[in-house]
């Protein structure tokens, strides 16, 4: 057995903290939040009700998802992608020009903490305290191989600009050099061993020297000879204990021979590599300077501290018109509550991350020529993918954690009630199943079938399928053995609307298996006629079981005919990644949302964009819509009103009525309250297609169930902050 289960259906559970059931009309964006355990009915006026509809909402706040803290960052200048390593061993790839969309996630493993990341050309490497160097297969989104460095825990890893060598700093005091060869790396030699562990490393841009930070010192090595050139002792600071060592957490080696270090006494120090002497020091924090990063043209340095601040230094002339330049502290950013463990200065922004789990992208206005949404401030708090799947026909929710799955049954409210009345919870949500993984791999993707009888999940190395049995409040599962060999692992999983088939997406293809009481049977493999080798990250099946759409990280969308098991067509490639898509149950049109907030509707049968989609592209979308900073994560359709498309991101729920005109940039975008105050005759002239509900926040999932109720899963950031370790205590003014 790959999993163990706990069944809680025998006795009723108390209502978990954070569950409400109420009715909203998205026509009222400022709808109040009901008390816990109550059901509130809210209506807009008759015009809004007919345009927007009314939904019973299961408001779920007991998904106890906790993102892992950020440990390392690495920016690839050529591809403009930033790699993020988290403390659970997972690695994420963000495409900076595409609104910092999270295009790839490589799941972590138990006991596989990462200390450093490094790009070498288009190859990505990591190293950690387990003493291993890892290279990643970015196409298939998994670990390519691991190699033991035989130096104990690894504290630092960095590649030279020439793309020929990789250096790691080890616990045993050695700097180990590895040569990059095709598809792997090969150990070359050790540099002179030191008495202290190597904490940080930085290559000289020429590749001829390397600086190593350690306890109380910085060592400069000649790569050709392997010997030390200079040993620079680091001051432990005024007022510190003599027994307290100074840790050089980060070093940066500039092309002019300047070395900049950040240490545990809160100092930024500037050194000369020719003489091995200290040029200048800056005290910036009473705690540690944990990370440094330099801009591409070496005129700016950013430092991350354990107080949660990012400090920028710029190499500027102190006197106008003079050539003499100095490193001067110019800016301080405070966008984190906890330790900043990693910083990276990219083309037009500073990216930082740490213990508070947020990835913050702070634009540098002096480097932005044209202000746009792509250069806006961003705080990325949650994954750009779904961690919750719902069984639409049976009222079940599947929560995906890194090491286990939880299956919950939605609660029920008391009666119908009048508009505005409160309805108590008649039946509390029940936790039916706790599915725990055995082994080291973390879950990559999971799904529950619409009927609620099948649960499937995949790690990087295996796929598991279970059949769920519910009888007399007793829940049991059966593991399906002898799965087809093609189901070895999956990047994305999806069930057909009638739960009769499972779609498993690998790198380029989609495998189709039929499900029955006897188990599962391989049906066929869907492959595109041509295109990218990148992995599939989205799947969407049509309600009638005839069509399947897949999207990959090269922005390609392929559509397959499930009756002939052949590729039907390919949607024209757009410059931005697809973040969510769905196939309309009536028209069989594919509706796609992109990372730049653009939307397209494509007729599968006609193999062309619809007239509505062409109108959107011709007239353009409202600036308030385009300037949103989180991607849409789901596309839904209201069977009772075919013209309605339901979308959501982390901060809003939106219904697009395709029968109404699009708002122009002069129109009031959030106009629901204005419409409510207008006479009925004037409403139609002021109405437009976008109706936004902001009652909910920090949304992880919204799903429209078969009974026309909405499930909204939230993870309030305030609740998340209470589960983080305490930050460094800082004295505040007048306290």
Image (cartoon, rainbow, N blue to C red):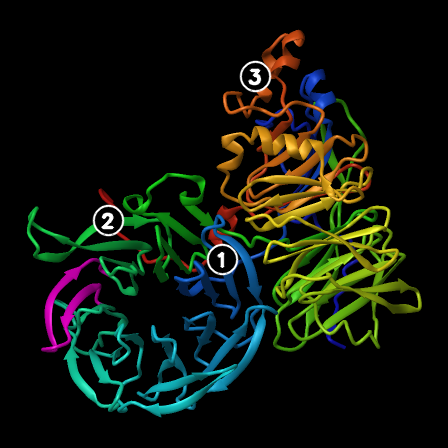
Circle 2 residue: 331
Coordinates of residue 701 in the picture (x, y in percent):
64, 47
Q: Nearer the viewer, residue 667 or 289?
A: 667
Q: Nearer the viewer, residue 667 or 38?
A: 667
Q: Describe the element under mark 2 as helix, strand or loop.
A: strand
Q: Nearer the viewer, residue 180 or 152?
A: 180
**How far apart in space, not on screen, are marks 3 and 2 (Cα)?**
42 Å
**How far apart in space, not on screen, are marks 1 and 3 (Cα)?**
39 Å
Circle 1 residue: 94
- Image quadrant where residue 448 sits: bottom right
Of the residues under marks 2 and 1, which one precedes in the sequence? 1
Residues at circles 1 and 3 in contact by the CB criterion of under 8 Å: no
Of the residues under marks 3 and 2, which one precedes in the sequence? 2
- Is 214 a magenta residue? no
- Is 277 a magenta residue? yes
Coordinates of residue 625 in the picture (x, y in percent):
54, 34
Give the residues drawn in magenta, as a range.
Answer: 265-286
Instruction: Inspect this view and state whether residue 716 appears.
Output: yes
Q: Describe the element under mark 1 as helix, strand or loop.
A: strand
**How far apart in space, not on screen, are marks 2 and 1 (Cα)?**
25 Å
Residues at circles 2 and 1 in contact by the CB criterion of under 8 Å: no
Circle 3 residue: 674
Residue at the (22%, 60%) spot, across then down? 286
Of the residues under marks 1 and 3, which one precedes in the sequence? 1
Question: For residue 235, which numbered disc appears in the image?
Answer: none
Q: Describe the element under mark 3 as helix, strand or loop.
A: helix
Image quarter in which the N terminus is found: bottom right
| Placement of 541 over or under 152, stated as above or below | above
Q: Nearer the viewer, residue 390 or 303?
A: 303
């Amino acid at each position: 057995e790959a999993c163990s289960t706990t069944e809680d259906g025998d006795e009723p559970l108390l209502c978990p903290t954070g569950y409400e059931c109420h009715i909203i009309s998205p026509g009222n964006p400022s709808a109040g939040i009901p008390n816990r355990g109550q059901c509130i009915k809210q209506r807009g006026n008759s015009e809004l009700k007919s345009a927007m509809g009314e939904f019973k909402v299961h408001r779920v706040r007991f998904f106890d998802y906790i993102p892992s803290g950020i440990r390392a960052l690495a920016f690839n200048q050529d591809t403009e992608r930033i790699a993020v390593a988290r403390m659970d061993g997972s690695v994420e790839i963000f495409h900076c020009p595409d609104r910092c969309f999270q295009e790839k996630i490589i799941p972590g493993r138990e006991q596989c903490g990462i200390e450093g990341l490094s790009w070498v050309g288009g190859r990505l490497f990591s190293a950690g305290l387990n003493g291993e160097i890892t290279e990643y297969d970015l196409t298939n989104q998994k670990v390519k191989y691991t190699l033991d460095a035989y130096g104990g825990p690894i504290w630092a890893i960095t590649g030279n600009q020439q793309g020929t060598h990789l250096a790691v700093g080890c616990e045993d005091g050695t700097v180990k050099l590895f040569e990059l060869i095709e598809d792997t790396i090969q150990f070359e030699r050790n540099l002179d061993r030191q008495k202290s562990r190597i904490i940080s490393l930085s290559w000289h841009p020429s590749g001829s020297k390397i600086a190593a930070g350690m306890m109380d010192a910085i060592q400069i090595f000649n790569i050709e000879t392997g010997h030390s050139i200079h040993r620079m002792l680091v001051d432990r600071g005024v007022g510190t204990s003599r027994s307290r060592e100074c840790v050089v957490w980060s070093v940066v080696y500039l092309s002019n021979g300047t070395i900049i270090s950040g240490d545990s006494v809160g100092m930024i120090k500037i050194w000369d590599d020719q003489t091995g002497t200290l040029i200048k020091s800056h005290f910036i924090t009473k705690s540690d300077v944990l990370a440094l990063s330099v801009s591409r043209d070496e005129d700016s340095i950013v430092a991350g501290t354990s107080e949660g601040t990012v400090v920028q230094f710029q190499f500027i002339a102190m006197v106008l018109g003079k050539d003499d330049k100095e490193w001067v502290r110019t800016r301080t950013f405070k966008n984190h509550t906890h330790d900043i463990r990693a910083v990276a200065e990219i083309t037009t922004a500073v990216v930082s991350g740490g213990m508070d789990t947020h990835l913050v992208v702070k634009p540098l206005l002096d480097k932005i020529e044209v202000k746009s949404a792509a250069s806006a401030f961003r705080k990325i708090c949650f994954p750009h993918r779904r961690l919750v799947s719902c069984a639409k026909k049976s009222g079940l929710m599947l929560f995906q954690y890194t090491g286990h799955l939880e299956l919950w049954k939605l609660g029920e409210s008391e009666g119908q009630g009048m508009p505005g009345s409160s309805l108590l919870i008649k039946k509390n949500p029940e936790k039916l199943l706790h599915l725990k993984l055995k082994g080291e791999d973390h879950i990559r993707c999971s799904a529950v079938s619409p009927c609620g009888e099948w649960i499937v999940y995949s790690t990087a190395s295996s796929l598991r399928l279970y059949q769920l049995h519910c009888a007399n409040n007793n829940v049991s599962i059966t593991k399906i053995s002898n799965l087809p060999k093609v189901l070895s692992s999956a990047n994305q999983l999806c069930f057909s609307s009638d739960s009769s088939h499972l779609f498993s997406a690998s790198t380029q293809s989609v495998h189709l298996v039929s499900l029955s009481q006897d188990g599962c049977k391989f049906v066929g493999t869907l492959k595109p006629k041509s295109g990218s080798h990148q992995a599939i990250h989205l799947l969407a099946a049509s309600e009638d079981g005839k069509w399947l759409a897949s999207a990959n990280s090269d922005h390609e969308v392929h559509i397959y005919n499930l009756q002939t098991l052949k590729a039907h067509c390919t949607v024209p490639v757009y410059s931005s990644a697809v973040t969510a898509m769905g196939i309309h149950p009536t028209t069989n049109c594919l509706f796609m949302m992109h990372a730049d907030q653009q939307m397209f509707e494509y007729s599968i049968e006609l193999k062309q964009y619809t007239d509505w989609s062409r109108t959107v592209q011709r007239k353009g979308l409202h600036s308030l819509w385009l300037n949103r900073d989180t991607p849409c994560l789901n596309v839904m359709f209201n069977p009772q009103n075919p013209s309605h498309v339901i979308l959501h991101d982390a901060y809003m729920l939106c219904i697009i009525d395709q029968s109404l005109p699009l708002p122009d940039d002069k129109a009031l975008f959030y106009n629901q309250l204005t419409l409510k105050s207008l006479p009925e005759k004037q409403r139609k002239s002021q109405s437009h297609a976008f109706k936004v509900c902001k009652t909910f926040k920090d949304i992880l999932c919204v799903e429209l169930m078969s009974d026309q109720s909405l499930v909204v899963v939230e993870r309030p950031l305030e609740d998340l902050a209470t589960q983080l370790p305490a930050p460094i205590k800082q004295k505040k003014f007048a306290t």
